[in-house]
Image (cartoon, rainbow, N blue to C red):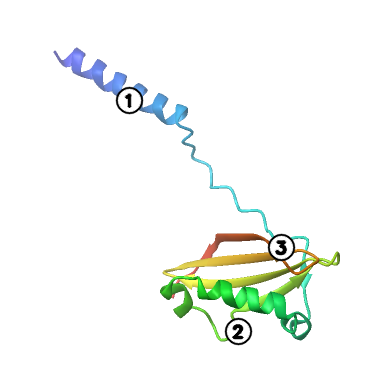
């Protein structure tokens, strides 16, 4: 009887191990999100903030955030970027419950938003 229980324990251990391998479980660290602003550099805030189309759009985007996200915005909620080809980006950082979230709004040469990216960029302790 003891041999049967011992064999079953090995069987279930092997079965669990196989299930983990087949489901893609790994012990490595999670992959980092590629930086969506890697091709951009900081823009002159006054220059980009005077761009009415982008300013109106990112302010409208902020209004779509949850009440908790809006509450966590700082006094200067947006940072402005450009890539030298006419594209612009707006970065909005929000810290909630120990996680820093980044919202990146990317605009084409005609100041039309072409992409919105939201991801957790890091952790912090308060």
Front residue of this view, candidates 123 and 60: 60
In the image, 34: left or right of 66? right
Question: Would you name the residue on which mark 3 appears?
Answer: 37
The single residue placed furthest to the left in the displayed view is 1
User: Which residue is at a point 36% across and 22% down the rendered structure image?
Assistant: 14
**Mark 2 vs mark 1: in front:** 2
In the image, 117: left or right of 72? right
Distance Cα–Cα, label 3 vs label 1: 45 Å
Question: Would you name the residue on which mark 2 appears?
Answer: 76
Q: Element under label 2?
A: loop
Q: Which image quarter is the N terminus in?
A: top left
Question: Would you name the residue on which mark 1 appears?
Answer: 13
Circle 2 packing at 10 Å, graded few (<14), some (14-19), many (20+), is few
Examine the image and state in which quarter residue 42 appears: bottom right
Distance Cα–Cα, label 3 vs label 2: 19 Å
The single residue placed furthest to the right in the displayed view is 85
| Residue 33, above or below 5 | below
Q: Earlier in the sequence, mark 3 or mark 1?
A: 1
| Residue 27, above or below 60 | above
Give coordinates of residue 36: x percent, y percent: 68, 59
Give coordinates of residue 89: x percent, y percent: 71, 68
Q: Earlier in the sequence, mark 3 or mark 2?
A: 3
User: Which residue is at a point 67% across and 71% down the rendered structure image?
Assistant: 90
Distance Cα–Cα, label 2 vs label 1: 54 Å
Circle 3 packing at 10 Å, graded few (<14), some (14-19), many (20+), is some
């Amino acid at each position: 009887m003891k041999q049967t229980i011992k064999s079953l324990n090995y069987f279930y251990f092997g079965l669990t191990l196989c299930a983990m391998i087949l489901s893609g479980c790994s012990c490595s660290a999670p992959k980092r999100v590629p930086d969506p602003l890697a091709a951009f550099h900081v823009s002159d805030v006054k220059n980009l903030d005077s761009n009415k189309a982008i300013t109106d759009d990112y302010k409208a985007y902020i209004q779509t955030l949850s009440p908790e996200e809006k509450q966590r915005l700082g006094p200067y909620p947006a940072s402005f970027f450009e890539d030298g080809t006419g594209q612009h980006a707006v970065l909005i950082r929000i810290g909630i419950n120990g996680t820093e979230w980044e919202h990146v709004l990317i605009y084409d040469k005609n100041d039309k938003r072409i992409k919105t990216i939201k991801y957790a960029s890091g952790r912090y302790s308060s």
